[in-house]
Amino acid sequence: MDLKPLQMDPLEIKPFVQVGEADVPKLLPILQKRLPYSVFAYNSVLMYPRFRDRMSFYTLHGEITETTWIVSVVVAEDYGLDYTISACQEKLSRDEAIQILSDCPLFKWGEPHLITPLEAWLTSIVFEVSVNKKGNVVEFHPARIFWMDVQDAENIEILGPEDEPSLRIQSLDVDKGVAFMTSTWKFAKPGTAVNMTRNISRNESGAVYIGGEPVCATMTMAFGMVSALHTLPEHRQKGYANLAMKFVFKELAKNGIIPATGVDIKNAGSIAFHQKLGCKMTQGLVHYVICHQSEF
């Protein structure tokens, strides 16, 4: 895969049109009105200056209006193309949306890809296209989005334990951070280390170090999702996950980025953790979509 932003002839991706660099910030007011379900598209716009070398934005018919469809694409070494879609349900009929997504070469249904959390109505369209029309074997992960208002995150207090003098709450350093995250993240695969190196070096992260080594950490993906939280087994039940999350939330908020993540609906422990942290939760379900392009 060419690990650069998608380079396609404008005629090939119609009816979608690539958004020019100068116009990307114009998407923010539209996405702000669609919060919280648009949070990862919103954060992607804010993080675009960090990822111009592998992130691109597209809108339906080149429109930048309140009803437009907005798609961002990040080229990654592990999961292929990472799509984030924010759309107005009233813009297109279901059949029109299915036809466009099925025919438009912007959507590489035949390659490995990940789609960040979709609203339920969009999930059903993607299912129809990817599974029923393209014949893909696809994972759909039901989840809810948890997020915190920027102002609330800015005001978070971070108080570490006083009985561990070597404990530090900080951002991940690249070398130890990549080693920790790739060895503990259950979704790591070939290429993940390269992707995580980039994300850790460019984005906000949060970690608890003891004796100079990370024992708990989380990081932010290119599309603005806090992810991969993990605490080593021997350091659990000490509040370290709470400290790492508060740190990364506060760091994101300093840059105006909305602290947000997605939690599988069956993960009761994580749901309770995020609620205790002070996060808000979407009432409606969303779905991660992962297509590995593996065959039986």
Image (tube, rainbow, N blue to C red):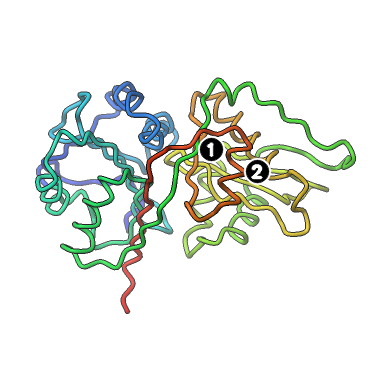
Instruction: Identify residue type, mark 2.
Output: Leu
Task: Identify the residue shown where x is 13% and y is 38%.
Answer: 92
Q: Is residue 277 left or right of residue 63?
A: right
The x, y position of residue 269, in whole percent, is 60, 51
Which quarter of the rendered picture does the C terminus lie within? Answer: bottom left
**Image quarter hosting the N terminus:** bottom left
Q: Secondary structure at mark 2?
A: loop
In the displayed structure, 242 sits above or below 80; it is above
Q: How many marks?
A: 2
Q: Write the residue at 24% across / 32% down.
A: 19
Residue 111: horizontal and vertical position, in percent? 28, 61
What is the crowding at mark 1: few (fewer than 14 residues within 10 Å), some, or many (at least 20)?
many
Question: Residue 175, relative to residue 205: is it above or below?
Answer: below
Q: Where does residue 94 sit, x and y in percent of width and height?
A: 14, 45
Residue on which disc 2 sits: 172
User: Type of residue at label 1?
Assistant: Asn
Judge the density around disc 2: few (<14), some (14-19), many (≥20) Cα neighbours within 10 Å: many
Q: What residue is shown at x 53% (from left), y 57% (from top)?
A: 193
At mark 1, the secondary structure is loop
Q: Name the image quarter holding residue 49.
A: top left
Residue 203 has which mark? 1
Q: x and y percent of residue 165 in the render?
A: 88, 40
| Side of 188 where 167 appears, left or right | right
